[in-house]
Amino acid sequence: MRQYADNELVDFAVVGTGAGGAPLIARLAESGFSVVGLDAGPYYRPLEDFASDEREQSKLYWLDERLVDGDNPIVMGGKNSGQAVGGSTVHFAMVSLRFRPEWFRSRSLLGYGADWPVDWREMWHYYGIAEQALGIAGPVHYPWGPWRPRYPYRAHELNGAAELLGRGAEALGMKWTPTPLATVSAPRAHAHGRSPPCVYRGFCRFGCSTNAKQSQLVTFIPRALAAGAEIRDLAMVGRIELGHDGRVAGVHYHREGRWRFQRARHVVVAGYAIETPRLLLASATDRHPHGLANSSDLVGRYLMTQSNQAVFGTMPQEVRWYKGPPSLAITEHWNYDDHKAFFGGYCWMAQGPLPVEWATIQTSARGLWGQPLRDAMEKYNYQVGLKMVGEMLPDERNRVTLADEKDQYGLRVARVTYAWGENDKALIQHALNQMQMSLEAVGAADIFRQEDDTNHLAGTARMGNDPATSVINPDGRSWDIPNLWVCDGSVFPTTGGVNPSLTITSLALRMADRIGALASRNEL
Amino acid sequence: MAERYAGYDVLGKRHTPSWNPKTREVIDARLAVYREPRFFTASEWRTLWALCERIVPQPKHRAPVPLPSYVDEKLQCRQLDGYRYASLPPQDEAWRRGLAALEAEAHSAHGAAFTALTSVQQDELLRRMQHGQLMGPAWQGMPCQLFFEHRVLPDITHAYYAHPTAWDEIGFGGPASPRGYVRMGLERRDPWEAPRAQAPGTQAPGSEAPRGEASRATTAPPQGSSQ
């Protein structure tokens, strides 16, 4: 790996190496820029470092303290954070979906949220590139939306839980499909590494120990290194330095027990919807007393999560849902049907929680403990479930601010405030009813609902065409400071009803091309 | 208590291709957890043992999984969750205060230590904690319901269901790297998975009621619908 000295002026310092940071680092390096990618987490070697164990692998999450409050506090940790090179893609469920085209203009076409400053056809182009780069395994024909090319790898075999999703959807008259997943269904070899096919061990959400998963750690990060970028792990960025000329000059970061400073011509923040606003707010100066890029007062606002409620039941036959990727089948029916009494859409997927997570569902959703908990847990091999990913509407009151409490670096911790709106609640109830009907149709008994779960994040540095109503311009550049950029899910104006990672990666690939175009016009 | 998966032993797979070296190292460390309290005081430790026995009661025919040791380890080694309800103090303070408050509530309700109560009395106190009905001064404003939901239940039950003994009981395949699984579909099973459940005198779970019977009475027939 090429390495840069702190006092070397690199073209780009990128803070965060996840679904947004990693592809941007790789593409910028491949375009000839000098790039350092910093990540607070370690650079893991999955074959040696990853155990088949839920508890051990929680080391992949962002476990530093954060405060949550509001009417519906967001549970953080595993479901929406990562602290590793590769970010949360090291432990994500690999679900790789495209937004519905109309969602990029949901205000104009569907009457809610805000329009994106990006055309869906441009995104469709970058989705295609991302799917190739990530070796997505999916169906030959995807049943919803405009035509898309076939996925590079064939769809995975279904497990019992996915079979039951399919039966239930058909009973309800809905289309369903094997889920497009970022784990290969056949051996993969390319210039920067090799992956064996998925062995269906089922610990996907706790890190893939065989490298079948096409996380950023095994795709764009090796590409970035091959192109000459440096990945600096265990480097916690605490502040962006503003120079006398009003441009940012580099980043202060904590590594190996001391604070250091990396000079850079451009700084890209790619820390996702909590750490990105936290860093921008913490970098306040006399000239920017409310934080960098925050003249609109929108940094930290319009935080969105996604509704992640579920319905579970007990089958008469063995399901053993711990085998294979947890979400092998999906229906996006309600993302593409507009005859609903609320805004937004949702999909649902098959489920396969491992024992600790399953116990959490029993204690939190049903309040079980004592002998009733033990009795419920013993039905583990017979359980089936459906879990939604639903769109929540942007609301400026849902936000990230800085608390007074400090973390181990002496940095103020993030306070995450969240409340569901009436539309969110209506969407959730609709989804719970639909999922319950699907489970009833396949003969599940003892059905119960997990009413309060959320997953994924977005917003807090929204992109747009107007500096008064957005933080980031359509190129990914902050409106206030020309050499400060954001490249992650925090730029989303709306969050859609599907998992966000493929859209984050596609946006990053687009942003790399925009930066290249600006550079070629000497407008960088 | 009858063992549903009698004879199934996840640890028996330790030397098979289902366990990579890192997994062996991690599970070895888990089984070798330090037994004596390092974070808790002797009196907190007694309360915690009694609490753990009510949250996850364990059968008498085997040594119990030492759940308090895992809670102690979490606090001693500062293993955080990545978030905290703003109305709860940090986890170490929450546990100290919560255990002291539980003892205070036991004294005020029964004039005895929590550890001296019958299991029925203990469960009744815990149910009141779960439903936010314990308001004594010893809580110092900490909502007892949040303490129960976000400290007591996860910290104790996660320790149990991360233990191979629990995996044997529920028939979970356990570690699976690098071998994974081959037979994926309904009612299919690899030879290295737990055998089919054999709860004596009962059918498979879920067959207590006719399929879908309970729900069919209350919900519309399963047809595509919209609002």
Image (cartoon, coloured by chain):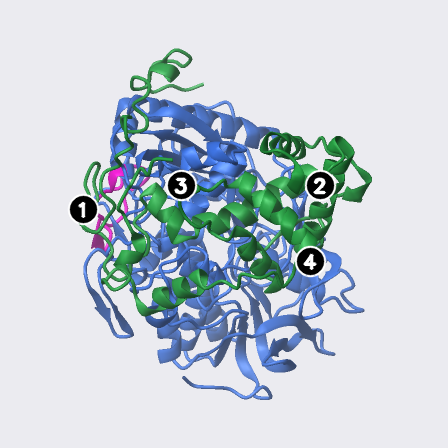
Chain colours: A blue, B green
Percent across and percent down for residue A450 are: 48, 33
Q: Nearer the viewer, residue A258 or A382?
A: A382
Q: Is residue A409 left or right of residue B56?
A: right
Percent across and percent down for residue B7 are: 26, 46
Alpha-carbon distance for marks 2 and 4?
16 Å
Percent across and percent down for residue B18 are: 26, 59
CB-based contact (under 8 Å), mark 3 and mark 4? no
Alpha-carbon distance for marks 1 and 2?
52 Å
Q: Is residue B65 left or right of residue B74?
A: left
Instruction: Name the mark on residue B41.
Output: 4
Q: Is residue A145 left or right of residue B84?
A: left
Instruction: Specify start and end residues of the magenta stretch as a single range.
Output: A142-160
Alpha-carbon distance for marks 3 and 4?
57 Å
Give the residue pinned by disc 1: B183
Alpha-carbon distance for marks 2 and 3?
60 Å
> Which circle, 3 or 4, is nearer the viewer?
4
Q: Earlier in the sequence, mark 2 or mark 4?
A: 4
In the image, what residue type sits under mark 1? Arg
